[in-house]
Image: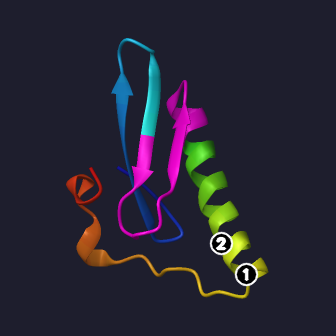
């Protein structure tokens, strides 16, 4: 698992594609991220969280607050 600004992401490695894929698992809004290494996966995760927060601000909507009850990777799978 990975965390940033209170948001938790869960990821897995696809052996066939040799690529990491993940989802934010402690909010309902679907946020996906990916990368070919842990470094790029982390950057992608942070970038997508920042994009989500900026989109909410731009649209005048409140961003969904991360729920401490939804940190299980199985919540979103």
Instruction: Give the residue displayed 65% in from the left and 72% down from the top.
Output: 53
Of residues 59 and 65, which is closer to you in this image?
A: 59
Q: Is residue 36 magenta?
A: yes
Residue 33 point in image, percent of width and height: 53, 44
Determine which residue is flagged by label 2: 53
Q: Residue at x 34, y 78 (%)?
A: 67
Query: Which residue is drawn at the image coordinates 21% and 53% (left, top)?
Result: 74
Q: Are marks 1 and 2 in contact (CB under 8 Å)?
A: yes
User: In the image, which residues are magenta?
Assistant: 22-41
**Drawn side of residue 77 relative to residue 54, left or right:** left
Residue furthest out toward the right: 58
> Does residue 36 sit above or below 71 in this rendering?
above
Q: Label 2: state its secondary structure.
A: helix
Mark 1 secondary-structure assignment: helix
Where 75 sits versus 58, above or below? above
What residue is shown with label 1? 57
Q: Image point 59% across, 61% down: which residue?
A: 49
In depth, the one of 8 and 25 nearer the eye is: 25
């Amino acid at each position: 698992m990975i965390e940033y600004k209170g948001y938790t992401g869960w990821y897995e490695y696809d052996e066939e594609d040799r690529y990491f894929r993940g989802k934010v698992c402690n909010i309902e809004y679907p946020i996906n991220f990916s990368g070919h290494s842990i470094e790029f996966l982390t950057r992608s995760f942070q970038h997508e969280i920042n994009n989500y927060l900026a989109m909410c601000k731009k649209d005048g909507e409140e961003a969904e607050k991360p729920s401490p009850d939804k940190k299980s990777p199985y919540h979103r799978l």
